[in-house]
Amino acid sequence: MDVPLWLALLVVGWLGVKLIRPPWWLIAVLLLGGFLLADSVFSPAIGALVK
């Protein structure tokens, strides 16, 4: 069964919010920070670190 990555991330994120109950500002900071880092000069270093 092939599950799209966006659907898997959505389910994991929803479960994390329901089970751990982090503050909403922390979720917003993580999402915005990840979005901004993905389009920065650090993205090649992050890509190499993830691989």
Image (tube, helix red, strand yellow):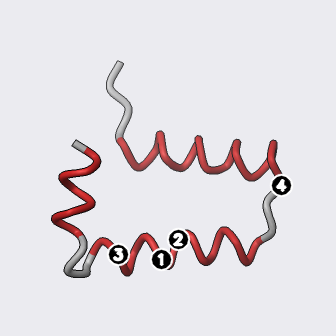
- Which residue corresponds to mark 2? 31
Estimate the spatial distance between the alpha carbons at disc 3 and disc 1, rounded to whole Å: 6 Å
> Which of labels 1 and 2 is toward the front?
1
Q: Is residue 12 above or below residue 43?
A: above
User: How far across and down, in percent of the image, does residue 19 sit?
Assistant: 81, 42
Which residue in the protein does label 4 denote? 21
Residue type at tag 3: Leu
Residue drawn at the location 21% of the way across and 56% of the way down: 47
Crowd rating for badge 4 (residues with CA inside 10 Å; few <14, some 14–19, many 20+): few
The alpha-carbon separation of the residues under discs 1 and 2 comes to 5 Å
**What label sits on residue 37 in the rendered view?**
3
Query: Where residue 50 is drawn, which disc sits there?
Result: none
Q: If you read the primary sequence from the N terminus, does the residue marked by circle 2 or circle 4 appear first?
A: 4
Give percent across and percent down for residue 34.
43, 70
- Give the mark nearer the N terminus: 3 vs 2: 2
The three-letter code of the residue at mark 4 reads Arg
* In-front residue for pair 29/9: 29
Q: Secondary structure at mark 3?
A: helix
Label 3 CA crowd tier, 10 Å (few <14, some 14–19, many 20+): few
The residue positioned 47% from the left and 40% from the top of the image is 8
Give the secondary structure at mark 2: helix
Tell me how far mark 3 sits from mark 2, CA to CA: 10 Å
User: Where on the picture, by quarter, is residue 21?
Assistant: bottom right
| CA separation in Å, label 4 and label 3 | 25 Å
At mark 4, the secondary structure is: loop
In the figure, 43 relative to 19: above or below? below
**Are discs 3 and 1 less than 8 Å apart at CB?**
yes
Label whose residue precedes the other's in the sequence (4 or 3): 4
> What residue is disc 1 on?
33
Whichever of labels 1 and 4 marks the residue nearer the N terminus, that label is 4
Residue contact between numbered discs 2 and 4, judged by CB atoms under 8 Å: no
Asked if the residue at tag 2 contacts the one at tag 1, i.e. Cβ–Cβ closer than 8 Å, the answer is: yes
